[in-house]
Image (spheres, rainbow, N blue to C red):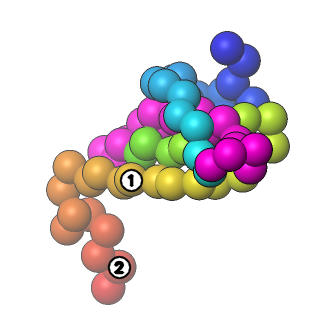
């Protein structure tokens, strides 16, 4: 599987979204950047975002004040 959205992402799994003849394939990728882990699902081929989950080890690091 070729990574087309990010060269630092790791392929996890594929899912089918929609119903009947209105279906698209979504590929889920794991993206690690510093202390954050993101699971992003994008449409195959066009990389249109479908879902995303962000996990932060220490949320206090996101405070900007």
Q: How crowded is mark 2: few (under 14 residues within 10 Å), some or many (20 or more)?
A: few
Element type at mark 1:
strand
Q: Tell me the CA gap for discs 2 and 1.
A: 21 Å
Which mark is nearer the camera, 2 or 1? 1
* Residue 12 spot, x, y in % from top left: 46, 24
Question: What residue appears at the point 80 percent right and 35 percent down from the top-left corner?
Answer: 45
Looking at the picture, tell me which residue is in the foreground, 65 or 44: 44
Considering only vertical position in the picture, is 36 above or below 10? Answer: below
> What residue is disc 1 on?
53
Q: Which span of residues is magenta-colored? A: 19-37
Q: Label 1 crowding class (10 Å Cα cut-off): few <14, some 14-19, many 20+?
A: few
Query: In what element is the residue under mark 2?
Result: loop
Residue at left offset 72%, top offset 35%: 44
Question: For the point 49% across and 25% down, which residue is it?
Answer: 13
Which dot marks residue 65?
none
Which quadrant would residue 54 be assigned to in this image?
Answer: bottom left
Reading the chain from its start, which is encountered first: label 2 or label 1? 1
Question: What is the chief secondary structure element of the magenta stretch?
Answer: strand
Please tell me whether residue 21 belongs to the stretch shown in magenta: yes
Q: Residue furthest right?
A: 46
Residue 64 is marked as: 2
**In magenta stretch: residue 20:** yes
Question: Position of 12 compared to 8: left or right?
Answer: left
């Amino acid at each position: 599987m070729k990574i087309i959205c990010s060269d630092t992402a790791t392929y996890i799994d594929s899912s089918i979204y929609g119903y009947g003849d209105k279906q698209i394939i979504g590929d889920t990728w794991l993206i690690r950047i510093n202390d954050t882990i993101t699971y992003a699902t994008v449409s195959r081929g066009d990389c249109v975002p479908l879902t995303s989950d962000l996990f932060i080890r220490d949320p206090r690091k996101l405070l900007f004040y």
